[in-house]
Image (cartoon, grey):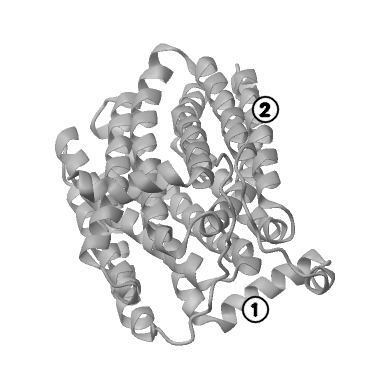
Protein backbone atom coordinates (compact mmCIF):
# COMPACT_ATOMS: atom_id res chain seq x y z
CA UNK A 1 0.00 0.00 0.00
CA UNK A 2 2.85 2.36 0.84
CA UNK A 3 4.36 1.81 -2.61
CA UNK A 4 1.14 3.03 -4.24
CA UNK A 5 1.45 6.37 -2.45
CA UNK A 6 5.22 6.64 -2.90
CA UNK A 7 5.05 8.83 -6.07
CA UNK A 8 2.82 11.35 -4.28
CA UNK A 9 5.01 11.40 -1.18
CA UNK A 10 8.18 11.79 -3.25
CA UNK A 11 6.66 14.66 -5.25
CA UNK A 12 5.80 16.65 -2.14
CA UNK A 13 9.07 15.76 -0.44
CA UNK A 14 11.47 16.57 -3.28
CA UNK A 15 9.73 19.35 -5.23
CA UNK A 16 9.66 22.34 -2.89
CA UNK A 17 7.97 24.71 -5.35
CA UNK A 18 5.10 22.36 -6.06
CA UNK A 19 4.87 21.68 -2.32
CA UNK A 20 4.41 25.38 -1.56
CA UNK A 21 1.84 25.81 -4.31
CA UNK A 22 0.07 22.71 -3.03
CA UNK A 23 0.10 23.94 0.60
CA UNK A 24 -1.30 27.29 -0.54
CA UNK A 25 -4.16 25.43 -2.23
CA UNK A 26 -4.86 23.38 0.89
CA UNK A 27 -4.98 26.38 3.22
CA UNK A 28 -7.09 28.61 0.97
CA UNK A 29 -9.46 25.76 0.04
CA UNK A 30 -10.02 25.03 3.72
CA UNK A 31 -11.06 28.62 4.28
CA UNK A 32 -13.29 28.61 1.18
CA UNK A 33 -15.32 25.58 2.18
CA UNK A 34 -15.20 26.29 5.91
CA UNK A 35 -16.80 29.68 5.23
CA UNK A 36 -19.29 28.65 2.54
CA UNK A 37 -21.91 27.29 4.90
CA UNK A 38 -21.69 30.48 6.94
CA UNK A 39 -22.70 32.47 3.85
CA UNK A 40 -25.59 30.07 3.25
CA UNK A 41 -26.59 30.41 6.91
CA UNK A 42 -26.73 34.22 6.68
CA UNK A 43 -28.98 34.10 3.62
CA UNK A 44 -31.28 31.53 5.20
CA UNK A 45 -31.39 33.54 8.43
CA UNK A 46 -32.35 36.84 6.83
CA UNK A 47 -34.45 35.63 3.89
CA UNK A 48 -35.51 31.98 4.11
CA UNK A 49 -35.90 32.01 0.32
CA UNK A 50 -34.78 29.09 -1.83
CA UNK A 51 -34.51 31.49 -4.77
CA UNK A 52 -32.19 33.88 -2.89
CA UNK A 53 -30.13 30.92 -1.70
CA UNK A 54 -29.73 29.76 -5.29
CA UNK A 55 -29.03 33.36 -6.34
CA UNK A 56 -25.81 33.53 -4.28
CA UNK A 57 -24.50 30.55 -6.26
CA UNK A 58 -25.57 32.19 -9.51
CA UNK A 59 -23.89 35.49 -8.54
CA UNK A 60 -20.76 33.57 -7.67
CA UNK A 61 -20.69 31.71 -10.96
CA UNK A 62 -21.66 34.66 -13.16
CA UNK A 63 -19.00 36.86 -11.56
CA UNK A 64 -16.42 34.20 -12.35
CA UNK A 65 -17.77 33.86 -15.88
CA UNK A 66 -17.86 37.56 -16.72
CA UNK A 67 -14.36 38.20 -15.38
CA UNK A 68 -12.75 35.03 -16.78
CA UNK A 69 -11.86 36.35 -20.28
CA UNK A 70 -9.93 39.37 -18.99
CA UNK A 71 -8.49 37.24 -16.16
CA UNK A 72 -7.07 34.79 -18.70
CA UNK A 73 -5.50 37.65 -20.65
CA UNK A 74 -3.94 39.01 -17.44
CA UNK A 75 -2.54 35.63 -16.34
CA UNK A 76 -0.81 35.15 -19.69
CA UNK A 77 0.56 38.70 -19.85
CA UNK A 78 1.72 39.28 -16.25
CA UNK A 79 3.61 37.35 -13.57
CA UNK A 80 1.28 34.62 -12.29
CA UNK A 81 2.97 34.34 -8.90
CA UNK A 82 2.42 38.04 -8.19
CA UNK A 83 -1.18 37.81 -9.35
CA UNK A 84 -1.91 34.89 -7.01
CA UNK A 85 -0.46 36.76 -4.02
CA UNK A 86 -2.51 39.87 -4.85
CA UNK A 87 -5.66 37.76 -5.20
CA UNK A 88 -5.12 36.10 -1.83
CA UNK A 89 -4.64 39.40 -0.01
CA UNK A 90 -7.70 40.94 -1.66
CA UNK A 91 -9.94 37.96 -0.88
CA UNK A 92 -8.73 37.88 2.72
CA UNK A 93 -9.85 41.47 3.23
CA UNK A 94 -13.13 41.03 1.36
CA UNK A 95 -14.48 38.06 3.35
CA UNK A 96 -14.33 40.12 6.55
CA UNK A 97 -17.08 42.23 5.01
CA UNK A 98 -19.60 39.43 5.62
CA UNK A 99 -19.41 40.29 9.32
CA UNK A 100 -21.16 43.60 8.55
CA UNK A 101 -24.36 41.79 7.49
CA UNK A 102 -26.55 41.97 10.60
CA UNK A 103 -30.01 42.77 9.18
CA UNK A 104 -32.23 41.84 6.25
CA UNK A 105 -31.63 45.29 4.75
CA UNK A 106 -27.88 44.59 4.56
CA UNK A 107 -28.26 41.19 2.90
CA UNK A 108 -27.39 42.72 -0.47
CA UNK A 109 -23.81 43.02 0.79
CA UNK A 110 -23.45 39.24 0.66
CA UNK A 111 -24.00 39.31 -3.10
CA UNK A 112 -21.70 42.29 -3.71
CA UNK A 113 -18.85 40.84 -1.62
CA UNK A 114 -19.24 37.45 -3.27
CA UNK A 115 -19.15 39.02 -6.74
CA UNK A 116 -15.93 40.97 -6.07
CA UNK A 117 -14.35 37.99 -4.32
CA UNK A 118 -14.99 35.85 -7.37
CA UNK A 119 -13.28 38.36 -9.66
CA UNK A 120 -10.03 37.70 -7.79
CA UNK A 121 -10.74 33.96 -7.79
CA UNK A 122 -11.10 34.15 -11.57
CA UNK A 123 -7.51 35.41 -11.68
CA UNK A 124 -6.15 33.04 -9.04
CA UNK A 125 -7.52 29.75 -10.39
CA UNK A 126 -6.20 29.84 -13.98
CA UNK A 127 -2.90 31.26 -12.69
CA UNK A 128 -2.55 28.35 -10.27
CA UNK A 129 -3.59 25.65 -12.73
CA UNK A 130 -1.38 27.11 -15.46
CA UNK A 131 1.57 27.10 -13.05
CA UNK A 132 1.45 23.40 -12.16
CA UNK A 133 3.16 22.23 -15.41
CA UNK A 134 5.86 24.85 -14.79
CA UNK A 135 6.85 23.50 -11.37
CA UNK A 136 6.66 19.80 -12.30
CA UNK A 137 8.26 17.53 -14.86
CA UNK A 138 6.07 15.90 -17.57
CA UNK A 139 6.27 12.65 -15.58
CA UNK A 140 5.11 14.39 -12.40
CA UNK A 141 2.22 16.26 -14.02
CA UNK A 142 -0.51 13.61 -13.69
CA UNK A 143 0.60 12.77 -10.14
CA UNK A 144 0.56 16.47 -9.23
CA UNK A 145 -2.98 16.95 -10.53
CA UNK A 146 -4.30 13.82 -8.84
CA UNK A 147 -2.71 14.94 -5.58
CA UNK A 148 -4.19 18.43 -5.97
CA UNK A 149 -7.64 16.97 -6.65
CA UNK A 150 -7.39 14.50 -3.77
CA UNK A 151 -6.21 17.25 -1.43
CA UNK A 152 -9.06 19.50 -2.55
CA UNK A 153 -11.46 16.66 -1.76
CA UNK A 154 -10.00 15.91 1.66
CA UNK A 155 -10.03 19.58 2.60
CA UNK A 156 -13.53 19.96 1.14
CA UNK A 157 -14.67 16.98 3.19
CA UNK A 158 -13.17 18.08 6.49
CA UNK A 159 -13.80 21.81 6.04
CA UNK A 160 -17.45 21.37 5.09
CA UNK A 161 -18.06 18.97 7.95
CA UNK A 162 -16.22 21.19 10.45
CA UNK A 163 -17.76 24.29 8.90
CA UNK A 164 -21.26 22.94 9.42
CA UNK A 165 -20.63 22.44 13.14
CA UNK A 166 -18.64 25.69 13.46
CA UNK A 167 -21.42 27.72 11.85
CA UNK A 168 -23.93 26.16 14.21
CA UNK A 169 -21.88 26.45 17.43
CA UNK A 170 -19.28 29.22 16.94
CA UNK A 171 -21.31 31.60 14.82
CA UNK A 172 -20.70 33.04 11.37
CA UNK A 173 -18.40 35.89 12.45
CA UNK A 174 -15.71 33.55 13.79
CA UNK A 175 -15.93 31.48 10.63
CA UNK A 176 -15.32 34.51 8.41
CA UNK A 177 -12.28 35.59 10.45
CA UNK A 178 -10.75 32.12 10.03
CA UNK A 179 -11.51 32.29 6.31
CA UNK A 180 -9.64 35.61 6.00
CA UNK A 181 -6.60 34.22 7.82
CA UNK A 182 -6.38 31.23 5.48
CA UNK A 183 -6.11 33.50 2.43
CA UNK A 184 -3.23 35.38 4.02
CA UNK A 185 -1.39 32.15 4.87
CA UNK A 186 -1.90 30.95 1.30
CA UNK A 187 -0.29 34.13 0.03
CA UNK A 188 2.77 33.51 2.21
CA UNK A 189 3.29 30.03 0.75
CA UNK A 190 3.06 31.36 -2.81
CA UNK A 191 5.45 34.20 -1.96
CA UNK A 192 8.05 31.61 -0.93
CA UNK A 193 7.68 29.54 -4.12
CA UNK A 194 9.66 29.97 -7.35
CA UNK A 195 7.22 29.67 -10.25
CA UNK A 196 8.84 29.96 -13.71
CA UNK A 197 6.77 31.19 -16.61
CA UNK A 198 7.38 31.45 -20.35
CA UNK A 199 6.53 35.06 -21.03
CA UNK A 200 5.20 36.49 -24.26
CA UNK A 201 7.82 37.92 -26.58
CA UNK A 202 8.03 41.68 -27.04
CA UNK A 203 6.26 41.27 -30.37
CA UNK A 204 3.49 39.17 -28.81
CA UNK A 205 2.97 41.69 -26.01
CA UNK A 206 2.74 44.50 -28.56
CA UNK A 207 0.27 42.56 -30.71
CA UNK A 208 -1.80 41.77 -27.62
CA UNK A 209 -1.59 45.21 -26.00
CA UNK A 210 -5.32 45.54 -26.60
CA UNK A 211 -7.03 43.17 -24.11
CA UNK A 212 -9.89 42.48 -26.53
CA UNK A 213 -7.42 41.38 -29.18
CA UNK A 214 -5.57 39.19 -26.70
CA UNK A 215 -8.81 37.59 -25.55
CA UNK A 216 -9.89 37.06 -29.14
CA UNK A 217 -6.60 35.38 -29.97
CA UNK A 218 -7.22 32.93 -27.13
CA UNK A 219 -10.64 32.06 -28.51
CA UNK A 220 -9.19 31.60 -31.99
CA UNK A 221 -6.53 29.29 -30.61
CA UNK A 222 -9.24 27.03 -29.14
CA UNK A 223 -11.33 27.16 -32.30
CA UNK A 224 -8.37 26.15 -34.47
CA UNK A 225 -7.06 23.44 -32.11
CA UNK A 226 -9.80 20.88 -31.55
CA UNK A 227 -7.53 18.59 -29.51
CA UNK A 228 -7.47 21.43 -26.94
CA UNK A 229 -11.12 22.41 -27.38
CA UNK A 230 -12.45 18.94 -26.52
CA UNK A 231 -11.06 18.74 -22.96
CA UNK A 232 -11.90 22.45 -22.52
CA UNK A 233 -15.59 21.58 -23.00
CA UNK A 234 -15.60 18.67 -20.54
CA UNK A 235 -16.22 20.49 -17.25
CA UNK A 236 -18.85 22.81 -18.71
CA UNK A 237 -20.79 19.95 -20.27
CA UNK A 238 -20.67 18.01 -17.02
CA UNK A 239 -21.83 20.85 -14.78
CA UNK A 240 -24.80 21.78 -16.99
CA UNK A 241 -26.62 19.24 -14.83
CA UNK A 242 -24.22 18.51 -11.98
CA UNK A 243 -24.36 22.15 -10.82
CA UNK A 244 -28.09 21.86 -10.17
CA UNK A 245 -27.68 18.50 -8.43
CA UNK A 246 -25.03 19.85 -6.06
CA UNK A 247 -27.18 22.91 -5.32
CA UNK A 248 -30.19 20.73 -4.54
CA UNK A 249 -28.23 18.91 -1.84
CA UNK A 250 -28.79 22.07 0.23
CA UNK A 251 -32.55 21.61 -0.10
CA UNK A 252 -32.28 17.87 0.53
CA UNK A 253 -30.52 18.52 3.85
CA UNK A 254 -33.27 20.95 4.89
CA UNK A 255 -36.48 19.37 3.57
CA UNK A 256 -35.83 15.63 3.31
CA UNK A 257 -33.18 14.88 5.93
CA UNK A 258 -34.31 17.73 8.23
CA UNK A 259 -30.71 18.14 9.43
CA UNK A 260 -29.85 21.69 8.32
CA UNK A 261 -26.16 22.69 8.18
CA UNK A 262 -25.04 19.41 9.73
CA UNK A 263 -26.84 17.35 7.09
CA UNK A 264 -25.44 19.54 4.34
CA UNK A 265 -21.97 19.19 5.82
CA UNK A 266 -22.31 15.39 5.70
CA UNK A 267 -23.55 15.32 2.09
CA UNK A 268 -20.88 17.77 0.93
CA UNK A 269 -18.29 15.73 2.80
CA UNK A 270 -19.46 12.68 0.84
CA UNK A 271 -19.02 14.70 -2.34
CA UNK A 272 -15.47 15.52 -1.27
CA UNK A 273 -14.60 11.90 -0.51
CA UNK A 274 -15.80 10.86 -3.94
CA UNK A 275 -13.83 13.50 -5.82
CA UNK A 276 -10.71 12.49 -3.88
CA UNK A 277 -10.94 8.75 -4.52
CA UNK A 278 -12.24 8.99 -8.08
CA UNK A 279 -9.15 10.29 -9.95
CA UNK A 280 -6.92 7.64 -8.35
CA UNK A 281 -9.23 4.80 -9.38
CA UNK A 282 -10.05 6.44 -12.70
CA UNK A 283 -6.40 6.51 -13.70
CA UNK A 284 -6.08 2.81 -12.87
CA UNK A 285 -9.10 1.92 -15.01
CA UNK A 286 -8.26 4.25 -17.91
CA UNK A 287 -4.48 3.99 -18.11
CA UNK A 288 -4.04 5.44 -21.60
CA UNK A 289 -4.61 9.17 -21.98
CA UNK A 290 -5.84 8.56 -25.53
CA UNK A 291 -9.00 7.05 -24.00
CA UNK A 292 -9.70 9.83 -21.52
CA UNK A 293 -12.05 11.84 -23.76
CA UNK A 294 -14.28 8.78 -24.17
CA UNK A 295 -14.05 8.09 -20.43
CA UNK A 296 -15.46 11.56 -19.70
CA UNK A 297 -18.72 10.63 -21.45
CA UNK A 298 -18.95 7.41 -19.45
CA UNK A 299 -18.40 9.36 -16.23
CA UNK A 300 -21.38 11.61 -17.04
CA UNK A 301 -23.69 8.64 -17.53
CA UNK A 302 -22.47 6.99 -14.33
CA UNK A 303 -22.91 10.15 -12.21
CA UNK A 304 -26.43 10.58 -13.57
CA UNK A 305 -27.34 7.05 -12.56
CA UNK A 306 -26.05 7.58 -9.01
CA UNK A 307 -27.98 10.81 -8.49
CA UNK A 308 -31.11 9.18 -9.91
CA UNK A 309 -30.81 6.73 -7.02
CA UNK A 310 -30.36 9.63 -4.55
CA UNK A 311 -33.73 11.08 -5.65
CA UNK A 312 -35.56 8.13 -4.11
CA UNK A 313 -33.69 7.82 -0.80
CA UNK A 314 -34.42 9.12 2.71
CA UNK A 315 -31.43 7.80 4.67
CA UNK A 316 -28.46 10.15 5.05
CA UNK A 317 -26.12 7.14 5.06
CA UNK A 318 -27.41 5.71 1.79
CA UNK A 319 -27.52 9.15 0.20
CA UNK A 320 -23.92 9.73 1.21
CA UNK A 321 -22.81 6.45 -0.37
CA UNK A 322 -24.42 7.26 -3.73
CA UNK A 323 -23.11 10.84 -3.62
CA UNK A 324 -19.60 9.48 -3.01
CA UNK A 325 -19.81 7.17 -6.03
CA UNK A 326 -21.33 9.88 -8.25
CA UNK A 327 -18.49 12.27 -7.47
CA UNK A 328 -15.83 9.63 -7.95
CA UNK A 329 -16.80 9.94 -11.61
CA UNK A 330 -16.99 13.74 -11.59
CA UNK A 331 -13.59 13.97 -9.87
CA UNK A 332 -12.05 11.79 -12.56
CA UNK A 333 -13.57 14.03 -15.22
CA UNK A 334 -12.00 17.08 -13.58
CA UNK A 335 -8.48 15.63 -13.39
CA UNK A 336 -8.56 14.01 -16.84
CA UNK A 337 -9.68 17.19 -18.61
CA UNK A 338 -7.22 19.36 -16.62
CA UNK A 339 -4.20 17.18 -17.42
CA UNK A 340 -5.12 17.01 -21.12
CA UNK A 341 -5.35 20.80 -21.27
CA UNK A 342 -2.04 21.27 -19.45
CA UNK A 343 -0.29 18.86 -21.80
CA UNK A 344 -1.79 20.19 -25.01
CA UNK A 345 -1.63 23.96 -24.41
CA UNK A 346 1.54 26.10 -24.81
CA UNK A 347 2.37 28.18 -21.73
CA UNK A 348 1.72 31.53 -23.42
CA UNK A 349 -1.89 30.48 -24.11
CA UNK A 350 -2.50 28.45 -20.97
CA UNK A 351 -4.04 31.24 -18.89
CA UNK A 352 -6.55 32.13 -21.60
CA UNK A 353 -7.42 28.50 -22.27
CA UNK A 354 -8.06 27.75 -18.60
CA UNK A 355 -10.00 30.98 -18.11
CA UNK A 356 -12.16 30.10 -21.14
CA UNK A 357 -12.74 26.66 -19.66
CA UNK A 358 -13.68 28.38 -16.39
CA UNK A 359 -16.01 30.71 -18.31
CA UNK A 360 -17.85 27.77 -19.87
CA UNK A 361 -17.96 25.96 -16.54
CA UNK A 362 -19.35 28.90 -14.57
CA UNK A 363 -21.91 29.86 -17.22
CA UNK A 364 -23.17 26.29 -17.39
CA UNK A 365 -23.36 26.05 -13.62
CA UNK A 366 -25.16 29.39 -13.33
CA UNK A 367 -27.80 28.31 -15.85
CA UNK A 368 -28.15 24.94 -14.18
CA UNK A 369 -28.58 26.32 -10.65
CA UNK A 370 -30.96 29.07 -11.82
CA UNK A 371 -33.15 26.53 -13.57
CA UNK A 372 -33.27 24.29 -10.50
CA UNK A 373 -33.95 27.22 -8.14
CA UNK A 374 -36.84 28.48 -10.31
CA UNK A 375 -38.32 24.98 -10.60
CA UNK A 376 -38.33 24.64 -6.81
CA UNK A 377 -39.33 28.24 -6.01
CA UNK A 378 -42.48 28.02 -8.17
CA UNK A 379 -43.25 24.41 -7.16
CA UNK A 380 -43.07 23.14 -10.74
CA UNK A 381 -41.49 19.92 -9.44
CA UNK A 382 -40.78 18.50 -6.00
CA UNK A 383 -37.18 18.25 -4.86
CA UNK A 384 -37.11 14.53 -5.63
CA UNK A 385 -38.57 15.03 -9.10
CA UNK A 386 -36.10 17.82 -9.85
CA UNK A 387 -33.14 15.63 -8.87
CA UNK A 388 -34.48 12.83 -11.07
CA UNK A 389 -34.89 15.26 -14.00
CA UNK A 390 -31.34 16.63 -13.86
CA UNK A 391 -29.94 13.13 -13.35
CA UNK A 392 -31.64 12.01 -16.56
CA UNK A 393 -30.33 15.08 -18.41
CA UNK A 394 -26.79 14.31 -17.21
CA UNK A 395 -27.05 10.80 -18.62
CA UNK A 396 -28.27 12.25 -21.94
CA UNK A 397 -25.27 14.62 -21.96
CA UNK A 398 -22.96 11.63 -21.52
CA UNK A 399 -24.60 9.77 -24.38
CA UNK A 400 -24.29 12.85 -26.62
CA UNK A 401 -20.60 13.19 -25.67
CA UNK A 402 -19.90 9.57 -26.64
CA UNK A 403 -21.82 10.01 -29.88
CA UNK A 404 -20.55 13.40 -31.11
CA UNK A 405 -17.36 14.38 -29.25
CA UNK A 406 -15.39 11.24 -28.41
CA UNK A 407 -15.26 9.82 -31.98
CA UNK A 408 -13.38 12.95 -33.13
CA UNK A 409 -10.55 12.45 -30.65
CA UNK A 410 -7.18 11.76 -32.26
CA UNK A 411 -3.61 11.63 -31.04
CA UNK A 412 -2.14 13.42 -34.02
CA UNK A 413 -0.45 16.80 -34.11
CA UNK A 414 -0.40 17.32 -30.37
CA UNK A 415 1.71 20.37 -29.42
CA UNK A 416 5.05 20.19 -27.64
CA UNK A 417 4.78 21.81 -24.23
CA UNK A 418 7.74 23.86 -23.01
CA UNK A 419 9.76 22.31 -20.21
CA UNK A 420 11.48 24.35 -17.51
CA UNK A 421 14.84 23.64 -15.95
CA UNK A 422 15.40 25.39 -12.66
CA UNK A 423 16.69 24.82 -9.16
CA UNK A 424 13.77 24.47 -6.72
CA UNK A 425 13.74 27.17 -4.08
CA UNK A 426 14.92 26.04 -0.70
CA UNK A 427 17.55 23.62 -2.04
Among the 4 quarters of the image, the one containing residue 160: top left
Indicate which disc residue 93 carries: 2
Looking at the image, the residue that sits furthest to the front is 427
Question: Do we see residue 63 in this rendering?
Answer: no
The C terminus sits in image quarter = top right
Q: Nearer the viewer, residue 292 or 19?
A: 19
Q: Position of residue 66 (x, y in %)?
A: 65, 55
User: For this view, does 70 lie left or right of residue 357?
Assistant: right
Question: Do we see residue 256 in this rendering?
Answer: yes
Callout 2: 10 Å neighbours few (<14), some, many (20+)? some
**Where 196 falls versus 13 (above or below)?**
below
Among the 4 quarters of the image, the one containing residue 283: bottom left
Q: Position of residue 278 (x, y in %)?
A: 27, 53
User: For this view, does 173 lie left or right of residue 318?
Assistant: right
The residue that disc 1 covers is 220
C-alpha distance separating marks 2 and 1: 37 Å
Q: Are marks 2 and 1 in contact (CB under 8 Å)?
A: no
Q: Nearer the viewer, residue 252 or 17?
A: 17
Please tell me which residue is depicted at 34% across the width and 69% down the height of the picture: 397
Among the 4 quarters of the image, the one containing residue 130: bottom right
Please tell me which residue is depicted at 20% across the width and 58% down the height of the picture: 305
Please tell me which residue is depicted at 60% across the width and 42% down the height of the picture: 193
Q: Nearer the viewer, residue 352 or 390?
A: 352
Q: Position of residue 255 (x, y in %)?
A: 29, 32
Please tell me which residue is depicted at 44% across the width and 55% down the height of the picture: 368
Q: Position of residue 308 (x, y in %)?
A: 21, 54
**Mark 2: which secondary structure?**
helix
Amino acid sequence: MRDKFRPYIDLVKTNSNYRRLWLAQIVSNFGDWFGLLAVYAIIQKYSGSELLLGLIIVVKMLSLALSSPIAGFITDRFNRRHLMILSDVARGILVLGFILITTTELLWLAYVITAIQMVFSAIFEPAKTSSIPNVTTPKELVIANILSAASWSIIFTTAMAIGGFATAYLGTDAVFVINAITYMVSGVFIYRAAIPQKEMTVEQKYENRNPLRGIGEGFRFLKNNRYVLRPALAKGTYTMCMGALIYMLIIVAEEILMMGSIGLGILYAARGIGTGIGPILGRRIFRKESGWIRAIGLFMIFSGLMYAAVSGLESVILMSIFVIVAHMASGSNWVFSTVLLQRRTPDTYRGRVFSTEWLLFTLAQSISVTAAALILEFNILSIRQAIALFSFLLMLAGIFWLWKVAPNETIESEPVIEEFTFEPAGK
